[in-house]
Image (tube, coloured by chain):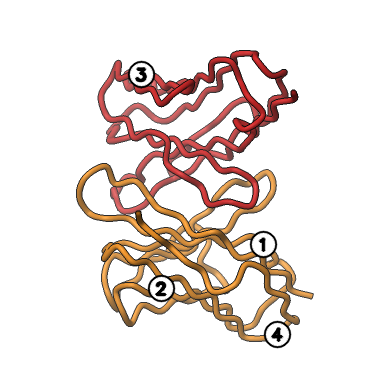
Chain colours: A orange, B red
Amino acid sequence: DVKVTQSSRYLVKRTGEKVFLECVQDMDHENMFWYRQDPGLGLRLIYFSYDVKMKEKGDIPEGYSVSREKKERFSLILESASTNQTSMYLCASQGTSGSYEQYFGPGTRLTVT
Amino acid sequence: ILNVEQSPQSLHVQEGDSTNFTCSFPSSNFYALHWYRWETAKSPEALFVMTLNGDEKKKGRISATLNTKEGYSYLYIKGSQPEDSATYLCASPNQAGTALIFGKGTTLSVSS
């Protein structure tokens, strides 16, 4: 089974802190994604990566950056956390053959106070 | 941005009821339609990936149909059970084919 893990289930940070959210997948997938989920807005794509050291902006990249130094790991960085970044963050991975379904991690509930 | 719309936003049914919800998407340049189930405190899990017009897929009591010409897909649940309570998401690839665009989901609550 594909396994996607995220470093924390719950995280509380203060405004202005630098925040790292880590995601690791064990299926050698090329593509990895970061989403945030907010009530009434659904899943919105922040950034994605289709290879090591490659990244593409999604629909809402402002205030975020990403890092992919190894194929299995994709990190989301909030350079200076703000209260409007309080949200549920989901990581996903996807292979480049077959059904192209995405496999999700359990999510990180981030609260910025 | 490609728009994927889902309706209704939420639904409450009694155990044993059958129910269905809708996903609509632009029919031009169609590639695939994904359905996911997201239970509380769990990760979203893929239910179906559909690519062919007229396709119908089934997993237990859950089935889905696809109409690519008119741009909609239906998800059906027969004889709903409390364990079917979840948010059901549909998604379609963006124009570049590099990422999925998700609808806002339909949240189903099944009472026993």
Q: In the rendered view of the protein, which quadrant contains the N terminus of chain A? A: bottom left
Inspect the image, locate mark 1, and give the three-letter code of the amino acid beneath it. Answer: Ser
In space, the residues marked 2 and 1 are separated at their CA atoms by 18 Å
Mark 3 crowdedness (10 Å alpha carbons): few <14, some 14-19, many ≥20: some
| Pointers 4 and 1 within a single chain | yes
Q: Which residue is mark 2?
A: A74
In space, the residues marked 3 and 2 are separated at their CA atoms by 35 Å
Q: Which residue is mark 3?
A: B67
Give residue A16's mark: 4
> Do callouts 2 and 1 mark residues in contact (Cβ within 8 Å)?
no
Q: Between disc 4 and disc 1, whose residue precedes?
A: 4
Residue name at image x 60 percent, y 38 percent: B87
In space, the residues marked 4 and 2 are separated at their CA atoms by 22 Å
Point out residue B102 in the picture as x, y percentages from the top left corner. 48, 43
Q: Between disc 4 and disc 2, whose residue precedes?
A: 4
| Pointers 3 and 2 within a single chain | no
Point out residue B82 in the picture as x, y percentages from the top left corner. 67, 29
